[in-house]
Amino acid sequence: MELTQAQKEILEGKKGETLAKVMKTLVMYGEAFDAAKMVEVTSDYNHLVTSFGLGVMDPVYELMDTLLSQNVVSKQKFTVDPRPLDPNVPSNFLQNIVFKHFMYNKQDFYEKQLQKLGLLEKDAFTCTCYMSEVGNTPKYGEVLSWSESSAVVYANSVLGARCNRNSGIIDIMGSIVGYVPYFGLLTDEGRKADWIIRIETSRKPEAQLLGSAIGMKVMEEVPYVIGLDKWIGNELNEEACTYLKDFGAATASNGAVGLYHIDGLTPEAKKFGRSLIKENAKEFIITDEVLQKTYDEYPIVWKDKEAKPKLCFMGCPHMSLQQLKDWTDTIEGKLKENGNGQVLIPTVFTASPAVIREFKKTSYWPRLEKTGIVLSYICPLMYMNNPLCARMRVITSSNKLRTYTTSRYYTDPEISDLLCKGGH
């Protein structure tokens, strides 16, 4: 790997042994992917995936202590993925014992380390850091050192920033030295599309289902989607961005997509058009039948598949302000239609602390409270990692949560019916 003089000096220890080790780690990471050089991180803020204080992560805490003791901290302020615990989210006595004593017993300690290292704000914990309410929104072309698959794919695709699918700890190391290896989605060639995806459905596809079908087909490669603008338009407005948030999270979790292009909509597709498609690109056509087949083939891991759900999680990734408003209208209307005052299944809507603060300033908040729905900043995935919670019958319309946990997937309309009408 070719390094600049400034980068060589860091690697040679001229700015301290600890910083040299960080640089060496990044160089080895880059060499594993045949990176020819390192490039500067140019975004204002970073985003880290490791938000949870698991008791078994002692090596991470030791590393953080070493960095802090040598005053080797992030050059950028950063946001972090959601917290794993919230006392407002339903859990029983035994589940709480596991959470607090066997799982996340280092949470407070770890959060103090993050604050000293460069946390943007005390409650800057969310997987949707790019939302305007949070304030970590990179600009077109900026080079990032992020991790968190759903945030990376959004930044690359919807914002036109440049970032690889980094792992935890690598993310903060890029911020500390200010450089990342140049390969993959940072390069022009790496951002070209390997697949043409043609949308030929008779109605607007469910974002989560469409993302799932594409992710499982293309895996880590780059898709160029044609025909979706018919359903979500040619403007990156609030509605389109919310759709792409959920769509992208499904492509990233059901496959390993780090970038997609939407013809006529996403910034690089608008700027470069179909010249982004590689010469020998493969093709995949999405029809109603493909989406139905995708849905029908999801495994249901509940022992009793006909049993009534015990809990519903919505918001993985975290919900937007507009989603909270729209879902308040939907739930209110459905409850009234079915003659019910509150939801029939305990339900948690999750959003970033910043979005929750804004939502609570609106007239929608007391209306949502009346429905019996809990509003939380929690990470549903971290909640479900508790083995006692994994036994629960949890439903969701998040394909990411379905993929990584024992929860069962339903479409948004099915979820609203289950919550307000009952049945199974």
Image (spheres, rainbow, N blue to C red):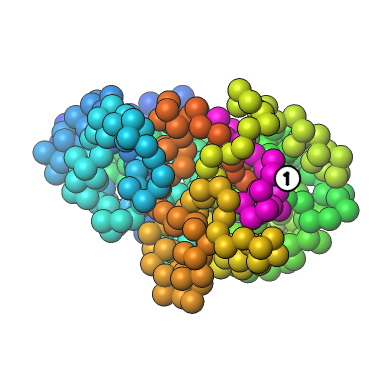
In this view, the residue in front, 68 or 275, is: 68
* Residue 60 in the image, given as x and y percentages of width and height: 26, 30
| Residue 385 position by quadrant | top left
Q: Is residue 304 left or right of residue 289?
A: left
- Say if residue 92 shows up in the picture: yes
* Quadrant containing the N terminus in the rendered view: top left
As drawn, is 59 to the left or to the right of 46?
Answer: left
SS under mark 1:
helix
Could you say where residue 110 lies in the image, as x and y percent from the top left?
23, 40
Residue positioned 70% across, 49% down in the render: 414
In the displayed structure image, the side of residue 79 where residue 343 appears, left or right:
right
User: Magenta segment: does it hold 408?
Assistant: yes
Q: At 59% across and 43% down in the image, what residue appears?
A: 396
Disc tally is 1
Q: Is residue 264 above or below residue 26?
A: below
Residue 321 in the image, given as x and y percentages of width and height: 51, 65
Task: Examine the structure image and report whether residue 364 is included in the region drawn in magenta.
Answer: no
- Residues packed near mark 1 inside 10 Å, few (<14), some (14 to 19) or many (20 plus): many
Residue of label 1: 210
Which of the two residues, 16 or 382, is positioned nearer the viewer here? Answer: 382
Which residue is located at x 55 percent, y 30 percent? 406
Residue most toward the front?
339
Q: Residue at x 51, y 48 (%)?
A: 346
Q: Amino acid at mark 1?
A: Leu
| Quadrant including the C terminus | top right
Residue 211 appears in the picture as rendered: no
Q: Magenta residues?
A: 402-424
